[in-house]
């Protein structure tokens, strides 16, 4: 039994990862409560996740706050722009005639918006880009690396399905269990997608595991 709880054992490291990600997801949830800060919170979550998966030293809450503060303006501006574009697309889908040639175009735009969002915050968590270069890079990479993009879409779709089904099964009085379902889905997505993005980003920047200020 002692071997299991040895700090060098795989079991101990696994439990440590699980504990760290629980703390990370609680921080993500708390800092996402104002809604408009969800981009900054997600960026910080990716920053901490990639550091943890790279076995780098640090304190979760300190690293989270560091990234949250340093990337707040860009990530919040991105969130606002994405929300506005998403709102326009939603309105168009609701009110455009189904026979209009512009109706199917909205779904193409929705797809492009979604995959650009998927890449924006992981990129921002690791690299120092100016705002428009960030969005351009996210858009181009999302369309170039389709395997990673589709994998992330499948993960998000599975998480969304699990959350919506939980809402269908549990009434509003079960808010606390639903909260845990959301945390579980987001935590799993951040963990798995971080592994994929780390592998992808290393193709462009071999020393990606260093902090942005150490790279540029």
Image (tube, rainbow, N blue to C red):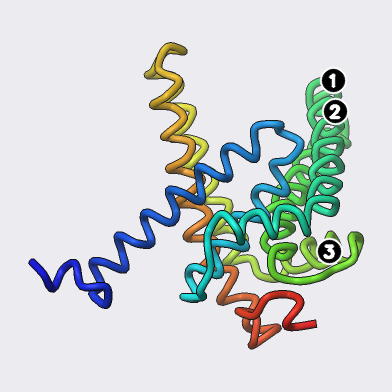
Q: Is residue 196 above or below residue 203?
A: above
Where is residue 102? Give x, y as percent: 88, 36
* First of labels 3, 1 by sequence position: 1
Residue 118 coordinates in the image, percent (x, y): 67, 54
First in residue order: circle 3 vs circle 2: 2
Report helix, strand or loop for mark 1: helix
Please state the horizontal and vertical placement of residue 115, each as a whole percent of the image. Answer: 70, 54
* Viewer-side label of 3, 2: 3
Q: CA distance from mark 3 to mark 2?
A: 27 Å
Dots 1, 2 in contact, CB < 8 A: yes
Which of the 4 image quarters holds residue 27? Answer: top right
Give the class, few, some or many, for how many residues have Cα within 10 Å of label 2's Cα (few <14, many ≥20): some
Question: Rounded to the nearest whole Å, what is the CA distance between mark 3 and mark 1?
Answer: 32 Å
Which residue is identified by label 3? 134
Determine which residue is flagged by label 2.
Answer: 92
Relative horizontal placement of residue 106, taking residue 195 as reference (left or right) = right
Question: Callout 3: helix, strand or loop?
Answer: helix
Quadrant that contains the N terminus: bottom left
Q: Residue at x 84, y 40 (%)?
A: 80
Label 1 and label 2: CA atoms lie apart by 5 Å
Between 88 and 117, the one nearer to me in the picture: 117
Position of residue 28 relative to residue 102, above or below, is below
- Residue at (45% x, 20% y) in the render: 175
- In the rendered structure, the answer to whether residue 213 lies left or right of residue 55 reads right
Observer-nearest of 98 and 173: 173
């Amino acid at each position: 039994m002692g071997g299991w709880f040895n700090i060098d054992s795989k079991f101990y490291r696994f439990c440590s990862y699980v504990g760290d990600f629980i703390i990370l997801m609680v921080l993500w949830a708390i800092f996402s409560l104002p809604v408009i800060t969800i981009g900054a919170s997600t960026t910080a979550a990716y920053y901490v996740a990639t550091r943890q998966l790279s076995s780098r030293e640090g304190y979760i809450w300190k690293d989270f706050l560091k990234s949250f503060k340093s990337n707040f303006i860009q990530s919040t501006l991105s969130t606002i722009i994405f929300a506005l574009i998403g709102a326009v697309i939603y309105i168009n889908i609701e009110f455009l005639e189904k026979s209009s040639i512009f109706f199917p175009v909205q779904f193409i735009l929705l797809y492009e918006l979604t995959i650009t969002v998927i890449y924006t915050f992981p990129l921002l968590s690791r690299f120092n880009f100016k705002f428009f270069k960030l969005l351009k890079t996210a858009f181009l990479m999302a369309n170039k690396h389709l395997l990673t993009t589709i994998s992330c879409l499948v993960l998000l779709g599975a998480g969304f399905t699990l959350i919506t089904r939980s809402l269908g099964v549990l009434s509003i009085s079960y808010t606390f269990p639903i909260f845990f379902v959301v945390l579980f889905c987001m935590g799993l997505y951040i963990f798995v997608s971080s592994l994929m993005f780390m592998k992808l980003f290393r193709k462009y920047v071999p020393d990606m595991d260093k902090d942005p200020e150490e790279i540029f």
